[in-house]
Image (cartoon, rainbow, N blue to C red):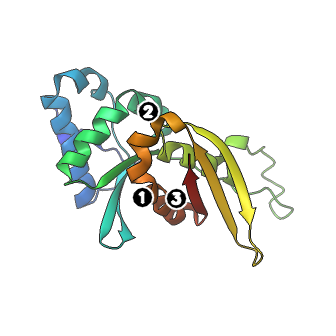
Amino acid sequence: MYTARRKIQKEKNAEPTEFELQVAQALFDLEVNATDLKGDLKELFISGARQVDLGAGKTAILVFVPFRLLKGFHKVQARLVRELEKKFSGQHVVVIANRRILPVIGKKNRRKRQKRPMSRTLTAVHDAILEDLVYPTEITGKRIRIRLDGSRLYKVYLDKKDQNNVEYKLDTFSRLYKKLTGKQVAFLF
């Protein structure tokens, strides 16, 4: 018997929260009811979900997926996000892959001489999160503005052709990125 519980598989067999079960149930319902998504969603599952308060009474839903399944989610992401936003009463839904940041190998931990892959560095993970946030749109450029007080503002230039599709979500993207990484970002076209 196939249930919605199989649509969420957390690390180390941890119990999912009530909200994660709701998102898993919504995915399961989409798989059962939407004939065009059925084949693509069959093998996909999520590893977590979180409702993030953006201030001013707005909330967004972060759906975490295993990195190895991200490409499968990208195939159906436009339709999947649209359907999930309908189910969760217009809250913005963002799909992000689970990534790990490995610590820098210092002098104190000389025993662990294993190399740290570039994909596990802080900068690489933060850049990948940024690309996941704006997925259907491509990032065409990035600039870092360092203010006089030392704070940094990241200016991210998005593809002009997707301006109509993404413009209403830009505030959500910048607030989510600030919550996830602590970096302030501004999106431009």
Circle nearer the viewer, 2 or 1: 1
Asked whether 166 or 7 is in front, the reply is 166
Residue at point 55%, 36% (across, down): 138
Marks 2, 3: nearer the viewer: 3
Residue 143 placed where, x, y %?
71, 52
Asked if residue 111 is positioned above or below residue 81 in the image, the reply reads below
Residue 156 at what x, y percent from top left? 61, 50
Q: Give the class, few, some or many, for how many residues have Cα within 10 Å of label 3's Cα (few <14, many ≥20).
A: some
- Residue drawn at (28%, 29%) of the image: 41
Q: Residue at x 32, y 64 (%)?
A: 59
Mark toward the start of the polypeptide (2 vs 3)? 2
Residue 177: give its label.
3
21 or 108: nearer the eye? 21
Does dot 1 land on a helix, a strand or a loop?
A: helix
Q: Position of residue 102 (x, y in %)?
A: 67, 53
Q: Report, in whole angstroms, how far the alpha carbon at label 2 lies from the one at label 3.
A: 22 Å
Name the amino acid, label 1.
Thr
